[in-house]
């Protein structure tokens, strides 16, 4: 299984960690850019919002990078975001892509588990516990780095230096493979900001 999910801010960092810790290959497309938007807009309804077009472009990029499974969080929220996954996956199939869908929030947990269980292999309980712990650790660290950047940016002496520092620590967090390393990076980031 090669699982992909669209970019939504920096949530890809903890999401990639949980997927990789479970022994599943993650495919993370490049950060959204003009080409991503153009690809998504080409296959989107004209009236649909910008985030729909960008996330659809992310899904197209992931499929072109070899993803065979797309995951998307869905729900019953006030905006149309809760329907993105289902609609986008229908669009992608209509234009000829074949892949497995995981619609978190729409599908029964047992159905999601049935799809994820085979690639996880043995020692499921330990892998799941470790994956959740690393996910939570990285999610907390990403939130902290983003908060430090928001606090520091208006006070920076050199324009753009805060963003450079934030990108550096987000990259390091993405590469971290243990909770201890994430903790160390959090301490470093506090001092650096």
Image (cartoon, grey):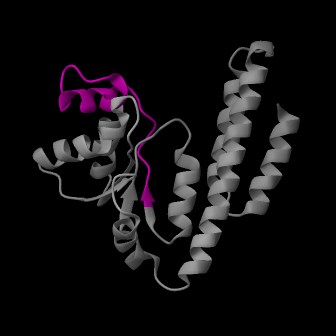
Q: Quadrant of the C terminus?
A: top right
Left or right side of 164 for 155: right
Q: Position of residue 134 (x, y in %)?
A: 66, 61
Which quadrant of the view contains residue 77?
top left
- Residue 82: x and y in percent read 36, 39
- The percent coordinates of residue 108 (x first, y second) are 36, 62
Asked if residue 29 is among those painted magenta in the image, a careful observer would answer yes
Residue 67 visible somewhere in the drawing: no
**Highlighted magenta segment, given as a residue range:** 26-53
Q: Is residue 153 above or below residue 33?
A: above
What x and y, as percent, mark residue 158? 76, 15
Seen from the viewer's position, the closer of residues 84 and 154 is 84
Q: Is residue 100 visible?
A: yes
Residue at the far right: name it: 191
Image position of 42 (left or right of 191):
left
Residue at (72%, 45%) from the top-left corner? Answer: 141
Residue 32 lies in magenta, yes or no?
yes
Query: In front: 169, or 127?
Result: 127
Residue at horizontal 71%, vertical 23%? 150
């Amino acid at each position: 299984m090669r699982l992909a999910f669209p970019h939504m801010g920096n949530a890809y960092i903890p999401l990639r960690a949980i997927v990789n810790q479970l022994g599943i290959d993650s495919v993370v497309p490049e950060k959204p850019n003009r080409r991503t938007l153009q690809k998504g807009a080409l296959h989107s309804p004209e009236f649909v919002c910008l985030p729909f077009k960008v996330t659809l472009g992310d899904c197209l990029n992931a499929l072109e990078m070899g993803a065979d499974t797309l995951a998307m969080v869905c729900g019953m929220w006030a905006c149309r975001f809760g329907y993105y996954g289902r609609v986008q996956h229908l669009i992608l199939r209509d234009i000829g892509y074949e892949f497995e869908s995981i619609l978190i929030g729409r599908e029964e947990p047992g159905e999601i588990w049935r799809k994820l269980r085979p690639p996880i292999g043995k020692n499921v309980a330990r892998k799941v516990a470790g994956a959740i712990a690393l996910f939570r650790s990285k999610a907390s660290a990403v939130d902290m780095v983003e908060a430090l950047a928001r606090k520091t940016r208006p006070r920076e002496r050199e324009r753009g230096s805060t963003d450079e520092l934030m990108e550096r620590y987000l990259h390091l967090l993405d590469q971290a493979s243990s909770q201890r390393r994430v903790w160390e990076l959090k301490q470093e980031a506090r001092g650096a900001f």
